[in-house]
Amino acid sequence: MVATSKPVPTPKVVRVEAVPVEVGGAGVVVELDAPVPRRWLKALKREMSRAEGMQVASAKFDGYFVYIHGVALDPPSAARRVSGMLATVQAG
């Protein structure tokens, strides 16, 4: 008998907030409704490496939160860019 694994549910985004940082650019906090599965984390990092203004950013994950720092965009643009990346990751 072959063991099958259940698909990992995709967390839903509760909110996205971007704040300016002193050295320029923005930091973004994403709140999710469930802890971040590893495959979701990898997909987000892959999207970040492709997105303009996000190549040097890094993401830290803590339970229901994703902290993205080093975004080379102003806060409104950073929030839009991250929201777009999240939509891509959610679509799978």
Image: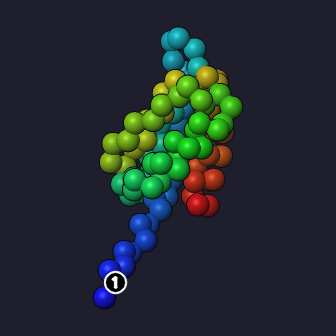
Which residue type does callout 1 highlight? Answer: Val
Direction top: furthest residue: 23
Label 1: few (<14), some or many (≥20) within 10 Å?
few
- Residue that carries the numbered disc 1 in the rendered image: 2
In the depicted structure, whether residue 31 falls above or below residue 69 = below
Q: Is 27 displayed left or right of 64 in the figure? A: right
In the depicted structure, whether residue 26 falls above or below residue 38 = above
Residue 56 position, x and y percent, is 55, 25
Residue 27 position, x and y percent, is 51, 27
Direction front: furthest residue: 1
Residue 83 position, x and y percent, is 61, 45
Residue 55 or residue 9, whichever sits in front = 55
Residue 69 or residue 50, whichever sits in front = 50
Residue at 39% over, 56% down: 37
Which quadrant of the structure image shows residue 4? bottom left
Residue 1 or residue 20, whichever sits in front = 1
Residue at 59% over, 36% down: 49
Residue at 54% over, 32% down: 18
| Residue 14 visible (yes or no) | no
Which quarter of the figure is the N terminus placed in?
bottom left
In the depicted structure, whether residue 44 falls above or below residue 79 = below
Which quadrant of the structure image shows residue 92? bottom right
